[in-house]
Image (tube, grey):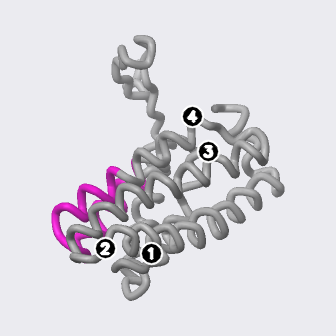
Amino acid sequence: MGPPTRSAIKTPALGGDKLKFKSEDVALTVIFAAIYAAGVVFLAPISFGVFQVRVADALLPLATLFGLPVALGTGFGCFIANFYGLGPVDVVGGAFANFVACVLARFIGGKTILHRFASCLVETAVVTLVVGSYLSALLNVPMEASLLGVFLGSVVAINILGFSLLEALHRSGVAKRFVEKG
């Protein structure tokens, strides 16, 4: 018998079941990380600052379909991309915001259009609060301006671009396999 195809981690916080991460999930994580990091770096002029439209954040809503690979991929992609940003707080804070936003979106689910839209709203709120808060301190700008700048960019990236991408996948039938799985 050959080596196991799945790695398993005991997760007592999740009911003691094993969290299974297939090789497909590893590949998806790497793909999402690479696309996210490349999107941020190539669009750096609009990806950093108080008023930013981080187009790569359009990947975040896909967590309702793909789950942990998107959460880890966009988190790690942000970690890498933010080395071009404002230093360690931005590197860790942005990655944390993406990961938490995606995990919450996955818990909300994506079986109905209302669930999918609600998950996008939650992702926008998390990214706005986390990133907007630390950008205010790092850039020495009023909290209101920082929150507004991140919020507006997140609405464009997550709620318009990301939700459109998510709906296109649902309507094309591509999402069916992942909705049944999750």
- The residue lying furthest to the top in this view is 16
Tag in front: 3 or 1: 1
Mark 4 and mark 3 in contact? Answer it, CB < 8 Å: no
**What residue appears at the point 41 percent right and 45 percent down from the top-left corner?**
100
x and y percentages locating residue 21 in the rendered image: 44, 33
Gap in angstroms between the C-alphas marked 4 and 3: 8 Å
**In screen coordinates, is 50 left or right of 113?**
left
Gap in angstroms between the C-alphas marked 3 and 1: 25 Å
Bin the neighbour count of mark 4 within 10 Å (Cα to Cα): few under 14, some 14-19, many 20 and up.
some
**In screen coordinates, is 118 left or right of 107?**
right
Q: Is residue 8 magenta?
A: no
Residue with the mark numbered 3: 64
Bin the neighbour count of mark 3 within 10 Å (Cα to Cα): few under 14, some 14-19, many 20 and up.
many
SS under mark 1: helix
151 or 182: nearer the viewer = 151
Residue with the mark numbered 1: 149
Residue with the mark numbered 4: 107
Residue with the mark numbered 2: 142
Span colored in magenta: 72-96
Tag in front: 2 or 4: 2
Q: Is residue 76 magenta?
A: yes
